[in-house]
Image (tube, grey):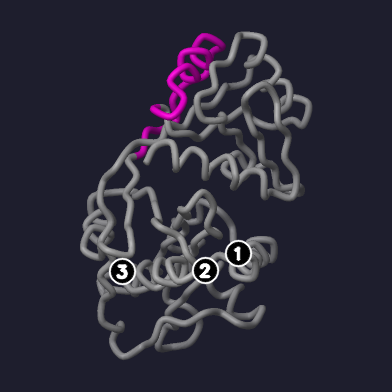
């Protein structure tokens, strides 16, 4: 599965509005933002970069004023991590990823009579973006660009789902990328703090996975942020499978 996840990561970055390929790496960019979580690189499966290759990669980031940063499954390219560390890259995080297939997916019951829905209007996409911003503690600000990214996911073969709050607006939601290499990444699962503990995360996660399976994907994978969320995902059919490594190169200042 590591090779499939890494091949997916490459295909996903090649879909970005702007991307660069350099010496065994693909670097994806979102113009208009310098967020390191949206502008990063990943190696081709099996890549064995030299010091010169890594220097070229760093240059792609530096010439744009961006933090050199990578996300990848290290087992799919064992030669990459040592080359990056030799150039000064340090660990941001190591995340275990979980995988669900059509055979393991278990769809939960509706949330308190509130259906899982696909957003349709700009207002609904904006409400979901705002809910996810709050769910993640303001790690990213709600914005028109964020709402537009969610709409693009839905309209280009991915899946975006939400559950409405009783008082109006959005209680929580999730999104999944379009499939590539027979898999897809499920990300951005979040519930507003006031609505947690009611099964919303499980419901929207299962709904987006089900939608992507209906489009032919053989699996869906995700990363989790803690034991609580891991238990939610495992209850609906996700199983631990591998790890992903996040490395970045601090400024030389």
**On the rendered structure, is 40 left or right of 114?**
right
Q: Is residue 253 visible?
A: no
Given contact means CB atoms under 8 Å apart, are the residues at marks 2 and 1 in contact?
Answer: yes
Q: Are marks 2 and 3 in contact (CB under 8 Å)?
A: no
Q: What is the number of the mark on residue 153?
A: 1
How crowded pointer 1 is (Cα within 10 Å; few <14, some 14-19, many 20+) is rated as some
State the residue at coordinates (46%, 32%): 246
- What's the magenta region? 75-95
Sooner in the amino-acid sequence: mark 3 or mark 1: 1
Residue 132, image x and y in percent?
A: 49, 64
Percent of width and height locating residue 190: 41, 63
Q: Which residue is mark 2?
A: 159
Mark found first going from the N terminus, 2 or 1: 1
Q: Position of residue 66 (x, y in %)?
A: 69, 32
Position of residue 96 relative to residue 154, above or below, is: above
Q: CA distance from mark 2 to mark 3?
A: 15 Å
Q: For the residues marked 3 and 1, what is the alpha-carbon distance in whole angstroms?
A: 20 Å
- On the image, the x and y values in percent for residue 210 come to 39, 71
Residue at 71% x, 18% y: name it: 56
Q: Nearer the viewer, residue 197 or 70?
A: 70
The vertical placement of 111 against 176, above or below, is below
Viewer-nearest of labels 3 and 1? Answer: 1
Where residue 141 sits, quadrant-wise, is bottom right
The disc at residue 202 is 3
Specify the quadrant that holds the C terminus: top right
Mark 2: few/some/many CA within 10 Å (<14, 14-19, 20+): many
């Amino acid at each position: 599965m590591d090779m499939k996840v890494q091949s997916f990561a490459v295909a996903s970055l090649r879909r970005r509005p702007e991307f660069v390929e350099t010496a065994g790496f693909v670097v994806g960019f979102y113009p208009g933002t310098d967020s390191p979580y949206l502008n990063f690189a990943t190696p081709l499966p099996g890549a064995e970069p030299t010091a010169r290759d890594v220097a070229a990669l760093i240059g792609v980031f530096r010439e744009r004023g961006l933090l050199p940063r990578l996300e990848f499954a290290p087992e799919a390219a064992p030669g990459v991590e040592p080359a990056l560390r030799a150039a000064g890259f340090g660990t941001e995080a190591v995340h275990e990823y979980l995988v669900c297939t059509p055979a393991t997916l278990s769809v939960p019951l509706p949330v308190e009579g509130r259906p899982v829905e696909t957003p349709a209007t700009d207002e609904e996409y904006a409400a979901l973006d705002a809910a996810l911003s709050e769910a993640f503690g303001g790690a990213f600000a709600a914005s028109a660009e964020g709402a537009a990214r969610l709409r693009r996911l839905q309209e280009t073969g991915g899946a975006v789902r939400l559950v409405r709050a009783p008082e109006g607006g959005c209680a929580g939601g999730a999104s999944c990328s379009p499939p590539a290499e027979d898999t897809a990444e499920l990300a951005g699962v979040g519930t507003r703090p006031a609505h947690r503990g009611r099964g919303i995360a499980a419901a929207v996660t299962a709904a987006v996975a089900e939608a992507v399976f209906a489009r032919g994907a053989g699996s869906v994978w995700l990363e989790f942020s803690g034991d609580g969320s891991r238990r939610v995902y495992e209850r609906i059919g996700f199983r631990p499978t591998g790890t992903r490594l996040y490395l970045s190169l601090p400024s030389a200042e």
